[in-house]
Image: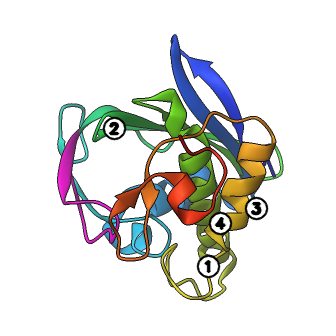
Amino acid sequence: MDRGSYIEYEGRPAVRFRRRYPHPPERLWAAVTEPGELAHWFPSAVRMEQHVGGRVEFSDDPHMEPTSGTVLVHEPPHRLAFTWAGDELHFHIEPSDDGGCTLTLINVLDAGNTAARNAAGWTVCLDELGKRLSGQPSHGPHGEFASAWRPLYESFVAAGMPSGAPLPGPSGELVDPGELGLPGGA
């Protein structure tokens, strides 16, 4: 399991994760493309026109207004990329010799200072994806049994990942990290 790292992707700031799963690529493809599967691990509800140029609609995220994006890459069951607000999400699924596969998730960031925030969020989401794929109950990244986001964020900041972007406050509004007693604030 890859804890997550800060990289440059085509000259832009990004966070990258690699996770291995004992499932064939087709199973993981379903988990990252089908709305009923995404509901168990993705931070918002997703409706996607599954073709390059297709519309992607995001809703029901307690920390974001509904928004839409565009499918950039659609190559079942190995590559998917789409825009989400100012970010891009890239999913690369590679088969392994043992019948399983590896997922590489790259979140290309609109702003570098969102790296620690987004890395913590994707860690929570990927933990929920792992639960879903292993048959454990998964109630999504906003559920009460999801990994705790705050210690993850603090560990990414402590490791030197860029930070400082507004964070969700107690009522869902975005606030400076310092207002929440977190590192990375202005």
Q: Is residue 2 left or right of residue 48?
A: right
Which is closer to the viewer, label 3 or label 1?
A: 1
Q: Is residue 74 visible?
A: no
3 vs 71: above or below = below
Q: Which of the marked residues, 2 or 1, is nearer the chain's N terminus?
A: 2
Mark 4 = which residue?
A: 150
Which is closer to the viewer, label 4 or label 3?
A: 4
Mark 1 = which residue?
A: 146
**10 Å crowding of disc 1: few (<14), some (14-19), many (20+):** some
Which is closer to the viewer, label 4 or label 1?
A: 4
Instruction: Identify the residue at horizontal 59%, vertical 67% (top origin).
Output: 129
Is the C-beta separation of discs 3 and 1 under 8 Å? no
Instruction: Identify the residue at horizontal 21%, vertical 60% (top origin).
Output: 65
Mark 2 = which residue?
A: 82
Give how far across and how far down residue 43 sits, in percent.
42, 65
Give how far across and how far down residue 148 sits, in percent.
66, 73
Q: Label 3, label 1: how many angstroms apart (C-alpha)?
A: 22 Å
Residue 22: numbered disc: 3
Q: Which of the marked residues, 3 or 1, is nearer the chain's N terminus?
A: 3
Magenta highlight range: 56-69
Q: Is residue 160 left or right of residue 31?
A: right
Q: Label 2: state its secondary structure.
A: strand
